[in-house]
Amino acid sequence: MEEISLFTKLIELLRVQPVLTLFLILGVGYLIGAIRIGSFSLGPVAGVLFAGLFLGHFGFQMSAGAQSVGFALFIFSVGYQAGPRFFDVLRTDGLKYFLLALVIAVTGFAVAVVAAKLLSLTPGTSAGLLSGGLTSSPTLAAAQEALRSGQVKPPAGISADDMIGNVATGYAITYIFGLAGLIAIIKLLPQVLGIDLEKEAKALEADDESGVASQQGNVSARIYKVTNEEMTKIPGKQLSEQYWDKTSVVKVRRDGEILKPDPSGYLQLGDELLILAPVNFFTETVAKFGEEIAHETGTAKFTETAQIVVINKQAVGKSLEELDIARKFGVLLTRISRMHMEIPRTVDFRLRKGDLLTVVGPRENVDLLGGEFGHVEREIAETDMVTFAFGIAFGVLIGLLAVNVGQLSLGLGSAGGLLTSGLLIGYLRSVHPTFGRLPDAARWILMEFGLLLFMAGVGLRAGGDIIETFAAAGPVLVVAGICVTIIPIFVGYLFGRKVLNIHPVLLFGGITGSMTSGASLSVVTKAANSSVPSLGYTGAYAFANVLLTVAGSIILFF
């Protein structure tokens, strides 16, 4: 009785402390999401959903205003993140990934609509089925907001609130298989098809004669004196081909002056090698030339780490081999990010607008590279709150615009408006880097907090009647969700291989991107023992987020 009394007191405390309740849901949700069974974990979205479902069963609710704020932060941030890449990729070979994402989205949409009709599911459940089966939070958010804002009118005999509940319960019931099933299928499908992803990835990398650029770990600046006479008998061109790894920065100083690169020249005893490189480069290569004459120092004293946003035409479309960053600019390229996903640095890798290069080098060299490639992003913490606030307000206003055709109201809705505003501001930010600053850390917290705030509301709303819904139609919904998850994967694979002729390694990455599943991408990269699949993921991800957001509103009309 005492335990029951304590639990009752806790529930009553939470009822009068909504802030405590919300952050308790978020914290518990993160803990649930972090639990691992083998290599599988639910992740924070599913964790928060479960925590919300539990309290929702006891009648807890979240105000519509708070959930709408979370929705706005999330959808706007999705658009902002995709903006730099979205418009540029349409003009490149990214068209293949747009078509892949489109086919997968349309297939999932069609399966969800047909299943809802055949199984006579209650209105709104099809949107939950689509978002849960494809594990697409933007689809769920767009569907619920379309109903909440009145963009979509419910059919006779059911209220908008009831339809929102159907969307939430449909999502909650189908999401878990959507997540676990997608990971399992992506893991097993290559084996069933007889595809060795690791072998294929190596073959793809082998097409680049120079292989993958070394993955830098700790970087340091050191000075070595040439004392090995054998190294003075090798001409500069052979030294470069045989010893320099094309990513490290190596300069020769003689009598206090830095020598210009000379393919036909030779080193001399006593020359000093000024090197900026990963630590293993010194132990494996440079030690053969002579002795270190200065103790190892961290790079902070002589260099800085900064990010270069690729914007300028002279860099876009060029390969790393053509750009020859280490030799021409004297900086070390340590990371390339596209759509906030790290991608492999093969020397034939071609830069696209919006790519983010992390470099280490002297400040003046970094500035020189930034001037040539685009814009230097240093550790500036401020967010352009004016643009951010007005961007969301502008998105809401765009969503209010609609044209009435009979009883049908045609417009972008809140989701489409916020997504459009985010895309435009994200794109303009890539063209004019001083505009719309939203540092990565700020974007992450706004996007993550917005999503989890919205998801907590979904869990609370669905928790009230999920047991009754599952008892009445749960098994049927699960089967329908399995179809929504599985069929688009197979259709996407066949379309990608037979029509688009995408390499299998890139295609599996593209499929996970089309279904916006970072967890599935990690399965593919692990199986391939390579980060190459992330190129396919980033190619499809930007389009998938946009397409699946739009699909969330449209499916409610069927």
Image (cartoon, rainbow, N blue to C red):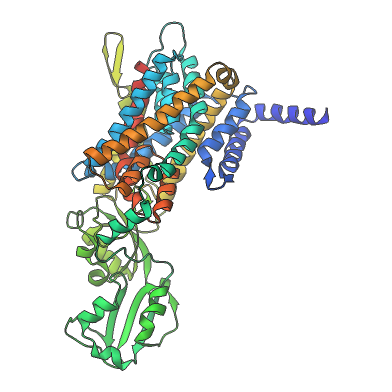
Q: Picture quarter containing residue 405?
A: top left
User: Residue lying farthest top?
Assistant: 157
Q: Picture quarter containing residue 160?
A: top left
- Percent of width and height locating residue 426: 30, 42
- Percent of width and height locating residue 278: 39, 71
- Residue 190 seen in render: yes
Residue sitting nearer the eye, 227 or 370: 227
43 vs 256: above or below: above
124 vs 260: above or below: above
> Residue placed at 42% from the left, 20% from the top?
126
Q: Picture quarter containing residue 336?
A: bottom left
Which quadrant, please, contains the C terminus? Answer: top left
Which quadrant, please, contains the N terminus? Answer: top right
- Percent of width and height locating residue 6: 77, 31
Q: How many marks?
A: 0
- Percent of width and height locating residue 496: 27, 39
User: Residue lying farthest right?
Assistant: 1
177 vs 540: above or below: above
- Residue 394 seen in render: no
Residue sitting nearer the eye, 526 or 48: 526
> Residue placed at 22% from the left, 80% from the top?
238
Residue sitting nearer the eye, 427 or 264: 264
Residue sitting nearer the eye, 452 or 306: 452
